[in-house]
Amino acid sequence: MNILIKIWLNYLHSGTNITFTDKIILKKIKFINSFSLIGMLSTSIFAISNLLSNKITNGTLEILLIILCIINVICFRYTRNYKIAGKNIVFLMYCVLIVLLILGGVNRTGIYWFYTFPLIAFFLLGKRSGLFYTGVLYLITIVLYFLHNKNYIPSFAYSFIEIRQMLASLAAVTSLVYFYEKIREDTESELIQQEKDIWLKDIFDQQFVAAAAIQKSFIPQTINSDFIDIVGYYKPAMEIGGDYFDFFQFDEDRTGIIICDVAGKGIPAALIMTKIRTIIKTMPDLAQIKPGDLLDNLNRFLVNESMDSVFVTALYMIINRKTHTIEFSNAGHFPMTYCSKNKILQDAGGHPALPIGIMIKEDQYRNHELKVSQNDVLVLFTDGFTDMTKKGKYCIGWETVEQIIIENSINPAIEISESLIKELNSVTDNINNMDDISLIIVKIKQ
């Protein structure tokens, strides 16, 4: 028994390759081999019965068909082309049907089983080929019956009623197989698309992670000297975002700080942010450029680049240790929050001009000056932070923000930043983080 099982399994895998990974192809190969074997066994039974009944012509033709089936299996084993093998099987079964229709057989009902063979075209070659080969079967049967009625064929083994029943049964089975194949193909197509979407998502996720790491490297964390203490915090709405801030230590006395917010978020905003950073980093004599002039240069670049619907709010300042002053210019950005002597000064931020990238206008970015003293605190932020301070279920009030700044004004910048972020995280919801959040704390130490 075990030997027979091994022979059967070996036959089923004829034409397969151990390197095949496509499960559907492997199933089709086994399907072809099964039909070939069943066809040969069935035909052998007819052949033996016909020969024993002295129906030499029938038996001889059926033996010939068996030999052709064996040749087909051998060819398939070496070519491994299941489509060619499938067509050969369909052709051979047509031959069996023609023989049985004209000459008959030992068991006339056996023809019903042979009528199912063209249906393998559905599984091997698709819906079109399945309908084509089934249609050919209809045509062969009708033509042979018509020729018999016209006395062109002397014998025909089956009556009109039997032929009609066989064709009706075949039509029903064909319909079922057709819709089964259609559902299978649609399902396979959907699965392939899902796999492709998952693959693309994995690629995009990997690229986003890499881009986020690169962008994170652009963002400075701290500057700490005996005069000034600066801490920055950045949280994009997506993996990457359009907020940008940077610190520049020009010399022992002067420190530059810029904060920008590109309209929008995600990849487009991140690309504009990268451009702005590149322009600033490559500006000659950056240390000598006044804040208003730097914003004017950025504005000219964006306008001349003809970037429609792209604008950027920005605030740039230079803190001077010798004079204890801050020189700054504002391009449509939120005014800084300035805490001095436990009080929040509301009008410290100067009058903001238009965001950069909208239009070119002479002297639109003016320079303002602010005197600072020991323990003063300056807070710069983007609108993602202010969105978290509006009234709502998951927001903190701006009064709470000001109170935290005042209460922590004697502390280092990192503690002020952590206190604000802790309060923000305790009250807000991540779902509410619909925009990039940037926060800069500047503490004047002496």
Image: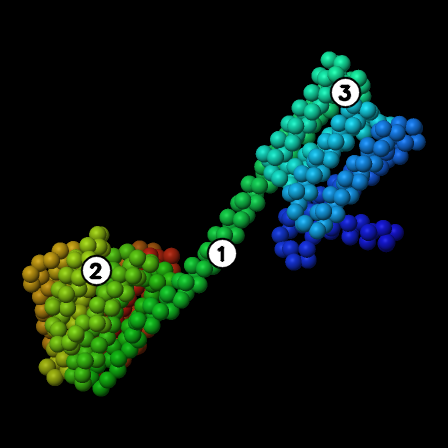
In the rendered structure, the answer to whether residue 400 lies left or right of residue 55 reads left
Of the two numbered discs 3 and 2 in the rendering, the one whose residue sits closer to the viewer? 3
Determine which residue is flagged by label 1. 199
The type of residue carrying mark 3 is Glu
Mark 2 falls on what kind of element?
strand
Question: Residue at 9% across / 69% down in the picture?
Answer: 367
Query: In the rendering, at what x and y percent does residue 42 appear?
Result: 82, 36
Distance of label 3 from label 2 (alpha carbons):
83 Å
Residue in the foreground of this view, choosing between 20 and 224: 20
Instruction: Identify the mark nearer the N-term, 3 or 2.
Output: 3
Locate the C terminus by quadrant: bottom left
- Callout 3: few (<14), some (14-19), or many (20+) C-alpha neighbours within 10 Å? few
Cα gap from disc 1 to disc 3, whole angstroms: 54 Å
Residue denoted by label 2: 312
Tell me the kind of residue under disc 1.
Trp
Question: What is the tally of numbered marks visible in this picture?
Answer: 3
Disc on the earlier residue, 1 or 2: 1
Q: Nearer the viewer, residue 113 or 277?
A: 113
Disc 3, disc 2: CB below 8 Å? no
Residue 62 lies, in percent from the top left, at 82, 33
Residue 314 visible here: yes
Is disc 1 in contact with disc 3, using a CB cutoff of under 8 Å?
Answer: no
Residue that appears at 46% across and 55% down: 200
Callout 2 crowding tier (Cα within 10 Å): few <14, some 14–19, many ≥20: many
Q: Do the numbered discs 1 and 2 sit on residues whose CB atoms are within 8 Å? A: no
Residue bearing the label numbered 3: 162
Decide if residue 356 is on the left or right side of residue 48. Answer: left
Residue 375 visible in image: no
Query: Does 200 sit above or below residue 442?
Result: above
* Vertical placement of residue 195 versus 112, above or below: below
